[in-house]
Image (spheres, rainbow, N blue to C red):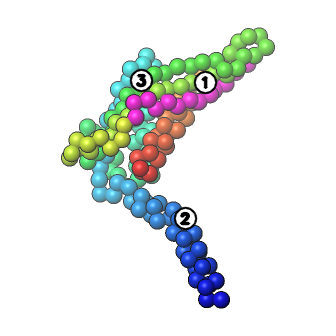
Amino acid sequence: MKFGKLVFTAFLLALLAGCGYRLAAKKGDAGAGQSIAVPTFANSTSNYRIEQSMSEAIRKELARNTHYKVTSADTGDLVLRGEVLGYGTTPTVLDEGGRAAQYAVSIVLKVLVTETATGKHLFQNDAMVFRETFQLSRAAGDFVPEDPAALQRLATQFASSLTANLVHR
């Protein structure tokens, strides 16, 4: 009977120890007491102001979900630099008349996070790719450009993904 209780207790402890809550608690104070600079990204595309949308989205996401003091300056304990390398739209759905009814928009970004004190690269990804779709109105008179909204959704996805990568490393 004692052996059965001992085995059950050992099993219960092993189960609880592997649940992951300890790891999450260690990461919960990401950036406490540190600053992170996110200067406006470079833009290697012909798309107007896309770099500003991406930079602002990551600043907002870091401020909302970490304890870093976020700044748009060039200096901080950490510096997150980025570049928009590519932008493109592709029709994905055609209507019965052969016109595009839905498009996919994609962006390619390069990101580098550097620790200022040591110059060490903490995170680097030279080709982060994000895609989003948007639909066009069927009536020509009702045309409303939907790509700005799709780009805003892409910026939010990018910021969320990058913040998760930085915090949960």
- How many callouts does the rendering have? 3
Q: Quadrant of the N terminus?
A: bottom right
How many C-alpha atoms fall within 10 Å of the one at disc 2: few (<14), some, or many (≥20)?
Answer: few
Q: Secondary structure at mark 3?
A: strand
Image location (x, y in percent) of residue 39: 32, 35
Q: Is residue 152 visible?
A: no
Q: Tell me the distance, in whole angstroms, between the alpha carbons under discs 3 and 1.
A: 17 Å
User: In the picture provided, is 24 more to the left or to the right than 138?
Assistant: left
Which residue occupies the extreme top position in the image? 97
Residue hosting label 2: 19
x 45%, y 61%: residue: 23
Question: Of all residues shown, which one is farthest toward the left?
Answer: 117
Considering the whole magenta stretch, tell me its main secondary structure.
strand
Q: Residue at x 72, y 16 (%)?
A: 94
- Specify which label sits upstream in the sequence, 1 or 2: 2
**Amino acid beneath label 2:** Cys
Query: Which percent across, then down, holds residue 11?
Result: 59, 74
- Say what secondary structure mark 2 lies in: loop
In the rendered image, is residue 88 in sight?
yes
Image disc number at residue 104: 1
Please identify, in this view, whether the residue under mark 1 or under mark 2 is nearer the observer. 2
Residue shown at 26% from the left, 37% from the top: 74
Q: Which residues are magenta?
A: 125-140
Q: Which residue is denoted by mark 3 in the rendering?
A: 85
Residue 154's mark?
none
Give whichever of discs 3 and 2 has the lower sequence position.
2
Does the magenta portion include 128? yes
Q: Residue furthest right?
A: 96
Q: Position of residue 147 (x, y in %)?
A: 57, 24
Name the kind of residue labelled 3 in the image. Answer: Leu
Cα separation, mark 1 vs mark 2, equals 39 Å
Circle 3 residues within 10 Å: few <14, some 14–19, many ≥20 = some
